[in-house]
Amino acid sequence: MSEDVTDLIMQDHREVESLFEKLQREPEVRAGLTPVLVTLLAAHSRAEEAEVYPAARDEAGEKDDVAHSQEEHLLADRLLAELSECDPFSAAYESKLKEVVDAVTHHVEEEETTVLPGLRDRLDDTRRAELGKAFLKSRQEHLGDMPQDITREEMRRQAANADIPVGNKDKQALRDELDQHADS
């Protein structure tokens, strides 16, 4: 198994695509599989935000692409929280799943054509392996988390990644500020 952070991220992307296909084709597995999807994407996002995006921004010069990717994470978090609240056999679930698939697929395509190539081009193999280990450790620590389990400090990191000035806001004020950027 590769330790290169770009390979690890893309491996997660392929796993998420596989989960999307299964959720779309097999409604009978949705009740059990939706929490798997939601927690996997939450853990993946928190690990990228903590370990990968700061390096991509500061070391690989991907400031604008990281900010855009972070804003897409904000939207995905909100959509995933909404999906997790839906009855898996309802029309609302179908509609929300489509929104999630569209948003995450768009994000994956952009990230794989901007941020990840920037990491490959501008960071050496050793640094990408270090980031890969840090990404896996962070991801493991967040497995089982739901998007709404995010801490104030993690939201402050999201704001920094997206270049959103937030000052010293409390958790709800941070959530409100980040939600505004998820809609833009």
Image: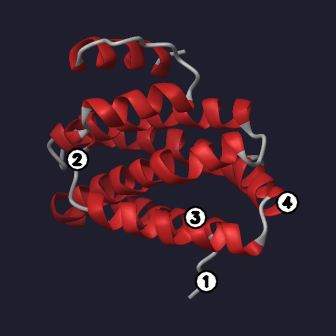
For marks 1 and 3 on the same chain, the one whose residue lies earlier in the sequence: 1
Name, please, the residue furthest toward the bottom.
Answer: 1
Q: Amino acid at mark 1?
A: Ser
- Closer to the eye: label 4 or 3: 3
Whole-number angstrom distance, CA of label 1 to CA of label 3: 12 Å
Residue matched to label 4: 121
Which residue corresponds to mark 3? 131
Residue 39 has which mark?
none
- Mark 4 / mark 3, whichever is N-terminal: 4
Select label 2 or label 3 by which is in front. Answer: 3
| Nearer the observer, 115 or 16 | 115
Task: Classify mark 4: helix, strand or loop.
Answer: helix
Report the amino acid beneath label 4. Answer: Asp
Please give the name of the residue rendered at 71% of the width and 56% of the height, measured from the top-left corner: 116
- Label 4 – label 3 distance at C-alpha: 15 Å
Q: Amino acid at mark 2?
A: Met
